[in-house]
Image (cartoon, rainbow, N blue to C red):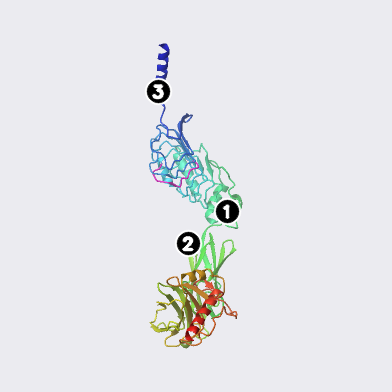
Amino acid sequence: MALGCYYFLLVLVLLDTQAAQPFCLPGCICSEENVGRTLKCMSISLGKIPRNLPEELKQMRIENSPLYELAQASFINTSTLEYLWLNFNNVTVIHLGALDLMPELRELRLEGNKLRSVPWTVFRATPLLRVLDLKHNRIDVLPELALQFLAKLTYLDLSSNRLTVVSKNVFLNWLAYQKHQQPGCGVEFHSSMVLALHNNPWVCDCRLRGLVQFVKSISFPIILVNSYLICQGPLSKAGQLFHETELRICMKPQISTPSANITTKAGQNVTLKCLSQASPSPSIAWTYPLSTWREFDVLTSSTAEDATLSQLVIPAAHPVDSGNYTCVASNSIGRSTLIISLHIQPVQASEDNADVDLRVVKHTGHGILLEWLAVAHTPEEWFTLYITSEEALRKEVIHMAPGINTYAVEDLLPSTKYEACVGLGNQPPRQGQCVVFVTGRDGGELEARERLLHVTVVLCVVLLAVPVGAYVWAVQGPCSEWGLHCYPHHRKVPRCPQAVPQYKDDSFKGHPTVCEDGEGHRVLEEEEEKVEEDKI
């Protein structure tokens, strides 16, 4: 009987103990530590902060989990929470209001996450926060007023992030916030303010001048965890310690050129120069009227610490290149512009010898798009476009109104050679004012031709796509005479020009080029032989 009563009382004690045991999340550990009730969730699958947190928590640690965000009002029943460690998770964003229900929070650690920025106003809800650990994230911006709601902060770790430029006012303001909390004016600080900024890719140009001076003269109450801050850029400063470098003040670009008016003859190489004095180093861009038609190489070099030279190279200048070229230099301080006037004198600038460039620019739904550019003619002049194909028994003469410089050639037949020429007014087309293009047979041949593309080969043939998987080879060159027999069937198509041109102008934007060789040459020969057999 006595033994039975003993076991009965033991069961009651166990039941009472279990009833008194506080609730804990599955997979987590709840315990009583020196700081108070603690929740530890280590290496468990938590995508977000659980809503059913135990009550009266003092410390919470969620680490090595897939936690990716701190949403608004994430923390429920956390009005007593003082220590929050969320290290080595995947937190990429902190939403406004995420810390609203933690007025007693004193320590927040977010080491080893993926934060690119921090909404600093979120700390308005945590006025007692003293420790903020953000090391090993991806933060690249620190606003001047970042610490305005962290007046009691005594430890800030921003090491091993992606900070490049930070204003010294961030930390001078920090001191001002701290001093504002002290009773009276001029009172001394009784606690240090520990700051970690090392292992960031600092760009030591004029924008960092204030911070460099601040680090050189830093003193109590601010203490740097590691005072050996190193410049990562620009190249002239890379590897230097903050204490070793001297930085100039910032200035907007000031640009100049050796000559603002250039006149030269057609066919000559022209180099336009733009020299910029600026700090930080500026970006330089060129604009000119034919930038969508002709693209030129731009060479940029540094001639001194704050001097950048940009050169626009125009090979074999054409009269169409005449016009105003604008050099624009800009940096974070401002921008400046400089205009260089270029005039290219044609060999003969008469109306009878006007220059017209004809190009196949792209394929359309059922054909190709031709585009031409003319100089040395009056704006009121009209053009005549000739399109012919001996095989398709097609000959068209189209009169184009002034101001129009494109025409779509539609309804092309497969395996057919076409020629297009353009003349000024009613004048016959001259050398260089014609293009010859050949359509392919099927989509398979298009794929075969695309595998033959070699962009660096001398301009010989342009490969274009046309409808229903066909292909087009567009050859730019002279035409011996205008008409159906411009290229007789008995004449073999050359593989590539044997004579090397005096210069190569590859500045025109267009399609990748491929030398007419191998299989492509044989296809044309086969087409010509087939036509001859049909004639026989």
Query: Relative to residue 471, is residue 32 depicted above or below?
Result: above
Instruction: Tell me which residue sits at (54%, 47%) in the image.
Output: 160
Looking at the rendered structure, the kind of residue marked 3 is: Leu
Mark 2 falls on what kind of element?
Answer: loop
Mark 3 falls on what kind of element?
Answer: helix
Eye-nearest disc, 2 or 3: 3
The residue to which callout 2 is attached is: 334
Looking at the rendered structure, the kind of residue marked 1 is: Gln
The one of 429 and 299 positioned closer to us in this rendering = 429
Instruction: Tell me which residue sits at (44%, 33%) in the image.
Output: 58
Q: What is the CA distance from the residue labelled 2 to the residue labelled 3? A: 75 Å
Q: Which residues are magenta?
A: 87-98
Q: Which mark is residue 232?
A: 1
Classify 10 Å Cα crowding around label 3: few (below 14), some (14-19), many (20 and above): few
107 in magenta? no
Q: Along the polypeptide, which appears first: circle 1 or circle 2?
A: 1
Query: From where the camera sits, is residue 460 visible?
Result: no
Disc 1, disc 3: CB below 8 Å? no
Q: Along the polypeptide, which appears first: circle 1 or circle 3?
A: 3
Q: Residue 331 location, x and y as percent?
A: 50, 61
The residue to which callout 3 is attached is: 15
The one of 397 and 53 positioned closer to us in this rendering = 397
Classify 10 Å Cα crowding around label 2: few (below 14), some (14-19), many (20 and above): few
